[in-house]
């Protein structure tokens, strides 16, 4: 058969070809943590627990308080720790996410405002809370906020955990603000131009044309931030809010503070958070792949 | 004109005097509020067995919780127990989040400037250390320059540091601190002597001892708002504590919660005892 270069034989000269630039490879991965969690096999925490169960028996063989007793104590405390502790962490994370999402969406739209002062203000607030340590923000909110506010003459008490919710929602707000800004700016400008040529007002363009295209691409980063937020809720224990970690400490105190209790109790907290966040991480990565902009 | 100025000045002076005399009186604001709403909010420990801790259902129990319930019963109101920590208990009382507290607090001069601590004190404890027998400490000076584990918020951390030049490594929880002692991250664990005593008698700390003489024997105080320590609230709590000493309630509770009997309570019981009995 006749060989035709470039068809059934290497092209003559073997000219260099410029392949399309792979953007994904050169952009920092915003999901680095979620991707890491999602890639863990599901049995990871059980393996950790196994190691934990064996390790202390070797390390503390000299003590009279056995690991079996420690796990038995954990078993007795489990219902309380889950019901009063972990569910409270989940509640804090849900409320903080709700507040952070609403405030962050407003701030994100502020960042793309046509008014320069609004844009500058939104940018400043976003950067301020995005780049401050979460714990510092929590402490400031807890100490600076009054514990009682008066609304129309009646004083309303703000419990500490509400302050914890507010403190956690601020960094979430700033990061969601960036998510919203990024998603809006990722919509091709041709969409804006086409909409404008059809005599849509700016508000109509934003609400009816641009934002509907954004929801899909905002969902994975939004879930990413929710998982990170949930894992940050134990920070509240440092403020004395009675969530899982605080109650674990109190439970260990009731069991006479044997050091053998530390690994089972904190390991149990790890397991709970893993079981809650792992499906979210898996789903996030799946959605992210599904919605990824294909070049 | 001069008259007007004169009368204004004297008016202000009168008003100031009136304000001065009012502030010296007892308003009994917190006490009255408690009576009005029929509920007293008492701050207690949830991490200090057997004084205040949780049972498996999450209920607060312990010697101080029994005392708190007795206070509410004698006041004739309901009780709400709020768990407090060493680091936030005085702020909670100052801010009015709690009406009073019985929270294993040592009665110190600097603390009396912030909260009202009525006498007589209901308990006392000293400072000691738990250390491995192998190290053979015999006096506090032996700890000089060494790392010693402690609990955050304990007043004696600073005293021991300054007096004996030890380096305190403070932990948020006792279990963590004791684990650090076992891991040899510190040579000793400085804490209340009564708590160390019950640890040693549990049999899980056979290679450890409490080798030093207890120091800074410090009475514990319950606290009411500072403005009301010399008013109804403070005097009522003084009466409660006096009667607990007098009728032996505290000694009974000590036995009930398995606390090592202290000479302090026996001595107070004898001193305040009813002369007719």
Image (cartoon, rainbow, N blue to C red):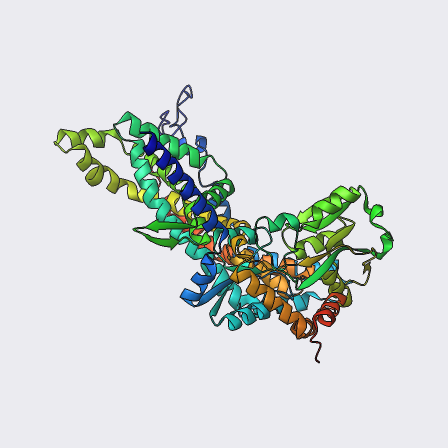
Query: Seen in the image, is A225 located left or right of residue A115?
Result: right
User: Which quadrant holds residue B245?
Assistant: bottom right
- Considering every residue shown, the one lying at the far left of the view is A199
Q: Is residue A67 above or below residue B164?
A: below
What x and y, as percent, mark residue B47? Answer: 61, 60
- Considering every residue shown, the one lying at the far bottom of the view is B277
What x and y, as percent, mark residue A23? Answer: 40, 31
Residue under the point 46% across and 42% down: A144
Q: Is residue A244 above or below residue A135?
A: below
Q: Is residue B69 above or below residue A158?
A: below
Between B137 and B183, which is closer to the camera in this rendering? B137
User: Which quadrant holds residue B126?
Assistant: bottom right
Query: Seen in the image, is B219 located left or right of residue A40?
Result: right
The C terminus of chain B lies in quadrant: bottom right
Residue under the point 59% across and 50% down: B87
Residue under the point 71% across and 62% down: B195
Number of numbered discs? 0
What x and y, as percent, mark residue B276? Answer: 70, 79
What x and y, as percent, mark residue B120? Answer: 65, 62
Between A24 and A157, which is closer to the camera in this rendering? A157
- Res A168 seen here: no
- Res A12 seen here: yes
The N terminus of chain B lies in quadrant: top left
Between A18 and A168, which is closer to the camera in this rendering? A168
């Amino acid at each position: 058969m006749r060989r035709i270069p470039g068809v059934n034989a290497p092209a003559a000269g073997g000219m260099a070809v410029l392949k399309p630039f792979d953007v994904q490879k050169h952009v920092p991965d915003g999901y680095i943590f979620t991707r890491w969690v999602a890639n863990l096999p599901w049995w990871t925490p059980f393996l950790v627990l196994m190691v934990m169960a064996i390790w202390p028996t070797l390390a503390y063989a000299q003590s009279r308080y056995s690991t079996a007793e420690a796990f038995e104590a954990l078993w007795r405390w489990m219902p309380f720790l889950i019901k009063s502790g972990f569910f409270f962490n989940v509640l804090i994370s849900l409320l903080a996410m709700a507040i952070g999402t609403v405030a962050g969406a407003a701030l994100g739209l502020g960042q793309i405002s046509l008014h320069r002062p609004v844009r500058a203000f939104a940018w400043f607030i976003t950067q301020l809370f995005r780049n401050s340590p979460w714990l510092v923000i929590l402490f400031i909110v807890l100490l600076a906020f009054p514990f009682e506010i008066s609304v129309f003459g009646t004083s309303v008490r703000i419990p500490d955990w509400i302050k914890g919710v507010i403190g956690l929602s601020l960094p979430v707000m700033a990061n969601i603000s960036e998510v919203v800004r990024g998603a809006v700016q990722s919509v091709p400008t041709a969409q804006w131009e086409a909409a404008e040529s059809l005599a849509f007002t700016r508000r109509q363009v934003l609400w009816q044309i641009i934002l509907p295209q954004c929801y899909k691409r905002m969902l994975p980063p939004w879930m990413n931030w929710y998982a990170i937020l949930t894992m940050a809720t134990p920070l509240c224990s440092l403020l004395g809010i009675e969530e899982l970690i605080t109650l674990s400490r109190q439970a260990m105190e009731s069991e006479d503070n044997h050091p053998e209790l530390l690994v089972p109790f904190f390991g149990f907290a790890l397991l709970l958070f893993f079981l809650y966040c792992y499906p979210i991480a898996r789903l996030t990565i799946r959605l992210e792949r599904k919605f990824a902009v294909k070049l | 004109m001069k008259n007007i100025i004169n009368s204004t000045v004297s008016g202000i002076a009168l008003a100031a005097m009136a304000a001065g005399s009012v502030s010296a009186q007892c308003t009994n604001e917190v006490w009255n509020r408690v009576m009005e709403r029929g509920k007293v909010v008492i701050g207690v420990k949830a991490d200090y067995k057997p004084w205040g801790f949780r049972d498996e259902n999450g209920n607060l129990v312990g010697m101080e919780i029994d005392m708190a319930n007795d206070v509410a019963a004698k006041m004739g109101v309901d009780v709400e127990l709020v768990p407090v920590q060493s680091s936030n208990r005085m702020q909670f009382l100052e801010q009015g989040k709690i009406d009073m507290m019985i929270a294993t607090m040592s009665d110190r001069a600097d603390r009396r400037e912030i909260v009202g601590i009525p006498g007589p004190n209901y308990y006392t404890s000293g400072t000691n250390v738990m250390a491995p027998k192998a190290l053979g400490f015999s006096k506090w000076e032996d700890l000089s320059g060494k790392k010693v584990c402690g609990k955050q918020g304990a007043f004696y951390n600073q005293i021991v540091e300054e007096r004996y030049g030890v380096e305190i490594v403070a932990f948020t929880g006792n279990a963590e601190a004791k684990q650090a002692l076992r891991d040899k991250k510190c040579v000793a664990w400085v804490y209340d002597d009564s708590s160390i005593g019950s640890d040693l008698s549990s049999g899980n700390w056979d290679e450890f001892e409490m080798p030093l003489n207890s120091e800074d024997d410090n009475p514990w105080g319950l606290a009411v708002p500072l403005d009301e320590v010399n008013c109804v609230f403070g005097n009522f709590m003084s009466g409660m504590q006096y009667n607990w000493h007098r009728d032996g309630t505290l000694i009974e509770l000590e036995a009930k919660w398995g606390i090592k009997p202290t000479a302090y309570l026996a001595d107070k019981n004898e001193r305040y005892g009813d002369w007719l009995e």
